[in-house]
């Protein structure tokens, strides 16, 4: 004799406790509106009869019954609303809002049943697609810049190869000179590819907090030892002021901290004049404000990355300063963009891949740190990276 299966636990209770649909719509993060209209020929007749909190905040709608054109004036959006109101078809439009920060919105409209008073009704939902659109533009810009940066040395190599196959093949002096240039261009391509791969790996894991403890002093000393021969070739010396070993400890990825130190110090060497000095300072236990304290009189300062601060947080600070040409104030905000190089510094011995500071910024962000720049034209530039210090026993 079989018995009926018992009802699944909780199903009956849940079905009796469904929240009201109005409460659901009120809590949606996307702006939702209901538009009513009677007269297809009168634009001011389109009125907002309902707007959830997200819509009221975005469009600054104070009262029900406000005209739609007082909130949104974009013609394509108004056309999509009319398609649903009077054509009883689904509509879609996109528009951008200006202001301090441009936003990109996707608007979808749907026809609803007519109201009791005969008014036509339409549902209007807005979706903020700013981030996806920005990422799309960044990918397009990245591909365009990467292909351009690779095409330049490739074109140079192709030209020299054709020359060596032609009239210069029997010219020993020209051949040796061309081969040297070709080797330099091939090295540039190799560095660019290495930096592209490095940046890709860093961005892939940027959301994953690093593990392990790093003595930043030892990391910086290793980088100084590695770069001393290059600095000597340029007649550049290092002036260091470092915290004692074993004190400036952070939770981090040692290889990536080495990358930060190498990129910042190498950059300072690159832009130092012959016989110049690169100042390297590493301090422990500073507040965020102390880490970015001004060091140059009359300098332009900018924070390229700021950490999320927790009360009482202390940082390990690495500061690298050169005494080179400096950077004008208007160029500072773009310095950590991929492939960006300051006008007038895009050729010659200082030519790099344009990815070094982007790599520094992404690594610093992964370590929940900060990055700042300070520069005075004709006097030099200072970069400061700072990372939350490790607490005793923290892994």
Image (cartoon, helix red, strand yellow):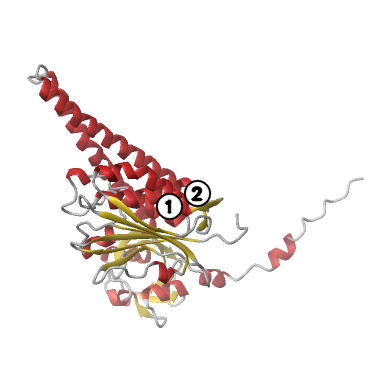
- Identify the image quadrant of residue 119: bottom left
Q: Earlier in the sequence, mark 2 or mark 1?
A: 2
Q: Which residue does the image show at 25% across and 68% down from the upper left?
A: 299
Q: Which residue does the image show at 24% across and 47% down from the upper left?
A: 235
Image spot of residue 22 (x, y percent): 54, 72
Between the C-alphas of marks 2 and 1, the distance is: 9 Å
Q: Label 2 belongs to which residue?
A: 253
Q: Is residue 233 left or right of residue 264?
A: left
Residue 84 vs residue 350, the one in the foreground: 350
Q: Which residue does the image show at 27% across and 55% down from the upper left?
A: 277
Q: Which residue does the image show at 25% across and 51% down from the upper left?
A: 340
Residue 311 vs residue 225, the one in the foreground: 225
Q: Label 1 belongs to which residue?
A: 363
Please say if the residues under marks 2 and 1 sit with CB atoms less than 8 Å apart.
yes
Residue 115 visible in the current orientation: no
Q: For the residue carrying disc 1, how many other residues have a C-alpha within 10 Å: few (<14), some (14-19), or many (20+)? A: many
Query: In the figure, 58 relative to 385: above or below?
Result: below
Q: For the residue carrying disc 2, how many other residues have a C-alpha within 10 Å: few (<14), some (14-19), or many (20+)? A: some
Work out which quarter of the rendered image holds the C terminus and state it.
bottom right
Given the current orientation, which residue lies at the most extreme right position? Answer: 1
Q: Is residue 306 left or right of residue 101?
A: right
């Amino acid at each position: 004799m079989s018995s009926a299966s018992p009802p699944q636990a909780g199903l009956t209770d849940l079905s009796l406790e469904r929240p009201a649909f109005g409460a659901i719509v009120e809590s949606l993060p996307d702006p939702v509106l209901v538009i009513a209209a009677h007269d297809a020929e009168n634009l001011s007749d389109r009125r907002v009869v309902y707007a959830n909190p997200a819509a009221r905040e975005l469009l600054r709608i104070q009262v029900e019954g406000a005209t739609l054109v007082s909130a949104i004036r974009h013609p394509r959006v108004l056309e999509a609303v009319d398609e649903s109101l009077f054509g009883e078809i689904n509509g879609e439009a996109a528009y951008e809002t200006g202001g301090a920060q441009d936003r990109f919105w996707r608007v979808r409209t749907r026809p609803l049943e007519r109201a009791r008073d005969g008014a036509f009704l339409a549902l209007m939902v807005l979706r903020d697609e700013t981030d996806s659109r920005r990422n799309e533009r960044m990918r397009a810009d990245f591909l365009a810049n990467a292909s351009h940066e690779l095409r330049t040395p490739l074109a140079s190599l192709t030209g020299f190869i054709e020359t060596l196959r032609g009239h210069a093949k029997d010219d020993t002096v020209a051949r040796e000179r061309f081969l040297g240039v070709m080797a330099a261009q091939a090295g540039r391509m190799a560095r660019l590819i290495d930096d592209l791969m490095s940046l890709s790996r860093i961005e892939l894991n940027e959301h994953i907090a690093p593990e392990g403890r790093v003595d930043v002093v030892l990391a910086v000393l290793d980088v100084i030892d590695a770069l001393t021969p290059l600095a000597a070739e340029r007649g550049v010396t290092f002036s260091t002021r470092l915290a004692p070993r074993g004190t400036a400890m952070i939770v981090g990825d040692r290889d990536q901290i080495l990358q930060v130190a190498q990129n910042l110090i190498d950059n300072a060497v690159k832009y130092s004049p012959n016989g110049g000095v690169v100042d390297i300072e590493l301090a422990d236990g500073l507040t965020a404000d102390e880490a970015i304290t001004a060091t140059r009189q009359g300098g332009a300062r900018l924070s390229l990355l700021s950490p999320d601060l927790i009360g009482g947080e202390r940082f390990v600070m690495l500061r690298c300063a050169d005494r080179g040409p400096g950077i004008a104030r208007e160029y500072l905000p773009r310095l950590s963009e991929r492939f960006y190089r300051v006008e007038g510094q895009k050729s010659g011995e200082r030519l790099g891949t344009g990815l070094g500071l982007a790599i520094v910024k992404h690594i610093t962000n992964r370590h929940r740190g900060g990055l700042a720049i300070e520069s005075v034209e004709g006097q030099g530039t200072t970069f400061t990276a700072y990372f939350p210090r490790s607490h005793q026993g923290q892994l």
